[in-house]
């Protein structure tokens, strides 16, 4: 039986046009792929959990960097975007809290897929809003 595998690949449609933020997003994709690999390769639960924690920690650092960027550039929807970050943080915390080292591979894959979906949706929906805003003021 072939192991399930899904990889994310960066493409220019994910770019927000801010090099530092784009680099963060590329790292998200890499970390999510590493988490997927740990699960599909049936690595030890401790390794899967370590990679899960790495995704969560990196996400938190990225959100802090984004929020600092918004304050510096007086982004008008900074508060709304920060609320979105808090929602993502809370969801990731619930996933982390529900991680069971003795869980089934399918449960781990479901959790990893949920993380992937949350972060990619955040990039493509929420982050594109500020990308469009900053592009519009740059064009003026």
Image: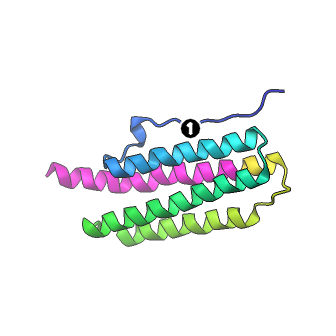
- The residue at the point 28 percent across, 56 percent down is 133
Question: Where does label 1 land, which residue?
Answer: 8
Horizontal side of 47 relative to 104 (left or right) equals left
- The residue at the point 81 percent across, 46 percent down is 105
Q: Secondary structure at mark 1?
A: loop
Numbered disc total:
1
Percent across and percent down for residue 98 are 75, 64
Residues 45 and 111: in front is: 45
| Magenta range | 111-140
- Direction top: furthest residue: 1
Q: Is residue 77 visible?
A: no
Percent across and percent down for residue 24 are 43, 51
Horizontal side of 36 relative to 22 (left or right) equals right
Q: Is residue 76 magenta?
A: no
- The residue at the point 74 percent across, 46 percent down is 109
Mark 1 is surrounded, within 10 Å at the Cα level, by few (under 14), some (14 to 19) or many (20 or more) other residues, namely few
- Quadrant (top left, top right, bottom left, bottom right) of the N terminus: top right
Percent across and percent down for residue 45 are 78, 52
Percent across and percent down for residue 116 are 60, 48
Q: Is residue 134 magenta?
A: yes
């Amino acid at each position: 039986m072939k192991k399930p595998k899904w990889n994310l690949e960066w493409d220019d449609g994910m770019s927000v046009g801010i090099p530092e933020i784009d680099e963060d997003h590329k790292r998200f994709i890499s970390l999510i792929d590493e988490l997927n690999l740990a699960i599909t390769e049936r690595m030890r639960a401790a390794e899967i959990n370590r990679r899960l924690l790495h995704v969560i920690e990196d996400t938190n650092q990225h959100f802090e960097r984004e929020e600092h960027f918004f304050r510096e550039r007086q982004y008008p929807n900074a508060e709304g975007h920060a609320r979105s970050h808090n929602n993502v943080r809370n969801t990731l915390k619930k996933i982390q809290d529900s991680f069971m080292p003795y869980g089934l591979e399918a449960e781990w894959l479901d959790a990893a897929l949920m993380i992937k979906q949350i972060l990619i949706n955040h990039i493509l929906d929420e982050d594109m809003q500020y990308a469009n805003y900053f592009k519009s003021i740059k064009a003026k």
